[in-house]
Image (cartoon, rainbow, N blue to C red):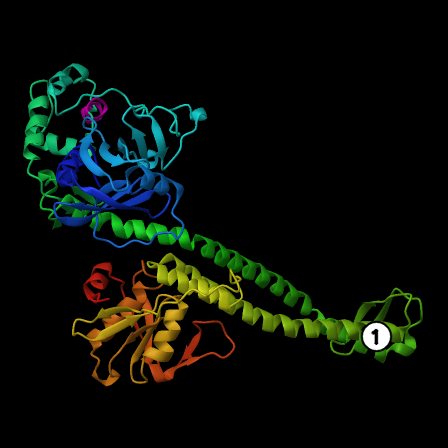
Amino acid sequence: MAFDGNFTHALVEELGFLVRGKINKIQQMDNSSLLFKMRAGGKNHQLLLSSHPMYARFHITEQKYEFPFEPPMFSRILRKHIEGGIITDIKQLGNDRQVHIHIRAINDIGDDIERILILEIMGRHSNIILTDTAYKIIDSIKHLTPNNNVRTIMPGFTYENPPTDKKLNPRTEELNELPKFIDFNSGKLKRQILKNIEGFSPIFIDEVESRVKYFNTDNIVPAIKETLDASKNIQPVYYNLKKPIFYFTPLTHLGEPDKVFSSLSELLDDYYHRRYQISLIRQKSSDYLQVIEREHEKVIRKITNLEHDLEEAAEKDKYQKYGELITAYMHSINKYQNSAVVMDYYTNQEIEIPLDPQLSPAENAQRYYNKYNKLKNREKVAREQLRLAHMDVEYFSNLLHQMENITTRDEVEEVRQELIEQKIIKERNRGKKKKKVNKIKLHEFKTTSGLPVFVGKNNKQNDYLTNRKAQNNHLWFHTKDIPGSHVVIAHNSSEVSEEDILEAAMLAAFHSKAGQSAGVPVDYTEIKHVKNIPGTKPGFVTYSEQSTVLVDPNADKVEEMKNENE
């Protein structure tokens, strides 16, 4: 991406229509993002402001967001001071990623007041700050206490600009002084330009350099001016490279863009929204992920202990033999002996049997029989527990894979409900009205021939798809011996082509733990041959009459197969 000072300049110009717009409502989604519902130019708009450490931005959004029941303190302060106010100006500070929004409002006693909302887009140091016209801080979305050795951002303190080096503003005559600050003999000219010019990004310097091939004293300033003039042609573009890049104008050195947008806000909405939502979902699901990881590790430790028990139980036959031999030769064994040497009639060799000298021969024999029975019972229990523990490992491995691929809040809720049902976590707020659980929504795709294919991304979705949604003659797919999703072609199996089968198998491979591998084995069979395993955790099935194909997961093909109405 390239949200630099030049991009900020273009975005401030685009949002100029908000000047004289009214802020009707202020809402705060989380601890870094705000939504202003506004009326400007005879239309309703949503202005999003975010100080997220990775997704800091500001733009008009068309997306819908969820808000906490209790508004956070910062949003209450904003409502008190600027809700109902009119935006009088939107200014960029120099050519930096700092924007000052001037707002005229009315306070509680009916007096006119002016406030300044400051946006600082600086990665993890991003912030949103409300001040009065004298730049006295009223509050901020992030506080910096006086002992942080940089600057103080707290109510009552005077606002100070971020402590950055003095740089030249390329949109003023200061740009002509650039050659004085560049050592053309020392190399690393791009780094020197970035160090001395405000609001430039490496991608913009690459665009400047592509016009002159190499920099010198005579061409460096004209090349920058020429590139800035060309960039007045605002055309938001996106380049789907190894590291995705977006910009407010085409970059000739990158060739043709992969996508062109009608506005900068549309570009930012498209680029950031899904990433931001996934970030929130990951954050929300992190507690459940830790629980699953803890249970997974606990079961692995249990397996180690059970295997140790089985190693000990392997001694049981020896103790049974000792008991039998003591009983057979009891007449020749005296009391108070520490051991007895007798003929082992199983091997026709002498064997020495340890004895407890305080016990009689009969009691020693009984002691060994008791050891044998105890280990025999332990072995029986351990083998059953080991079988269940291996199933639990598979179950938690499946859950871990599913957590890696969560993309919606509903999926987080489905995992939470499953953990509660399995008594892995406790239901909170007992006695209160239960939160309504949304209807399970499967992920839908279409084969090249148009057949619908459904994918379950967690155990609840898998169970619903296999046991309720699918019909007996539908084809069911799953990676062979690899955690993954249940996949079903919802069509009569007799009418499914080989190409349809390969495409559905590819979806199963893609939505599995082997999603980044090649030659993934995928089993498929009719639903009527898929059975639940009684007494097991969700997601476990057994199947028969299957065939197996080898496929390579293909992300582009998966995207192409997505049902647009999903």
Q: Is residue 495 left or right of residue 176?
A: right
From which residue to which does the magenta span run?
189-197
Q: Is the residue 500 above or below the residue 358 in the image?
A: below
Q: Furthest-right residue in view?
A: 335
Q: Is the residue 357 above or below the residue 20 in the image?
A: below
Towards the viewer: 155 or 524: 155
Q: Quadrant of the C terminus?
A: bottom left
Towards the viewer: 71 or 214: 71
| Picture coordinates of residue 379, whole percent (x, y) | 66, 72
Q: Quadrant of the N terminus?
A: top left
Towards the viewer: 344 or 120: 120
Q: Main secondary structure of the magenta part?
A: helix
Towards the viewer: 231 or 398: 231
Q: Is residue 137 magenta?
A: no
Q: Is residue 109 left or right of residue 214?
A: right
Q: Is residue 547 visible?
A: no
Which quadrant of the view contains residue 399? bottom left
Q: Which residue is mark 1?
A: 365
Which quadrant of the view contains residue 110? top left
| Picture coordinates of residue 312, whole percent (x, y) | 68, 65
Q: Furthest-top residue in view?
A: 180
Q: Residue at x 80, y 78 (%)?
A: 324
| Picture coordinates of residue 523, whole percent (x, y) | 34, 74
Disc 1 crowd, CA 10 A, few/some/many (<14, 14-19, 20+): many
Q: Residue at x 16, y 14 (%)?
A: 180
Which quadrant of the view contains residue 89? top left
Q: Furthest-front residue in view?
A: 109
Q: At label 1, which amino acid type do we have?
A: Ala
